[in-house]
Structure formats: structure tokens, C-alpha cells
Image (tube, rainbow, N blue to C red):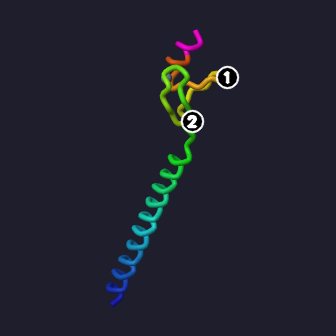
Amino acid sequence: MTRLLFIIILFVVSYLVIKSFLTKLENSKKIGKQRTANTKMLKCEECGLHIPEHEAIRQGDHVFCSLEHARQRLE
Ligand SMILES: [Zn+2]
């Protein structure tokens, strides 16, 4: 009898752990999507490519997609 109870508890606990894990995973996916949607896009002054703000290379007021383009433009 004690053994059966133990198995049931084990089952319930593992179910809860898996469920909370899946919920976390789902939430992190949602947050990731929201972040992508809210990302400001900036235009490279050298080639015109649009890049997310956090990936852009800034040189004063100028915005570039890569260090190479920043160098090409400012040399
Ligand atoms: Zn560029």
C-alpha cells in the first residue's frame, strides 16, 4: 500500500515538474518573439541593409551593418 502511494506521488511530482518546465519554455519563446517584434531596425549607411539595433555598429551619428562598412565609409 505504501509502495502504491509512493508511485502515485512520484507520478504527480514528475507531472508537475514537466508541466512547469513546458510552461517556462513556452513563456521564454513568447518573450523571444516579443523581443524580435520590438527590435528597432537601423539602416546601414554604406549598403542600405537593415539590421537590428543591438547588432548595428555605431560611429557617432552614423550606423553601419559591419565594422568593414564603418571603415569603408569613414576612411
Ligand atoms: Zn553595410
Describe residue 4's horizontal placement relative to residue 30 as left or right. left
Asked which secondary structure carries label 1, the reply is loop
Label 1 to label 2: alpha-carbon separation: 14 Å
Numbered label attached to residue 53: 2
Q: Residue at x 55, y 22 (%)?
A: 45
Q: Which residue is mark 1?
A: 60
x, y (%) of residue 52? Answer: 53, 36
First in sequence: mark 1 vs mark 2: 2
Describe residue 10's horizontal placement relative to residue 58 as left or right. left
Q: Amino acid at mark 2?
A: Glu
The answer to which quarter of the image holds residue 53 is top right
Q: Residue at x 53, y 33 (%)?
A: 55
Q: Residue at x 35, y 77 (%)?
A: 11
- Numbered range of the magenta stretch: 71-75
- Residue occupying the far top of the picture: 75
Nearest the camera: 42 or 2?
Answer: 42
Up/down of 21 relative to 48, above or below? below
Up/down of 51 relative to 5, above or below? above
The answer to which quarter of the image holds residue 59 is top right
The answer to which quarter of the image holds residue 6 is bottom left
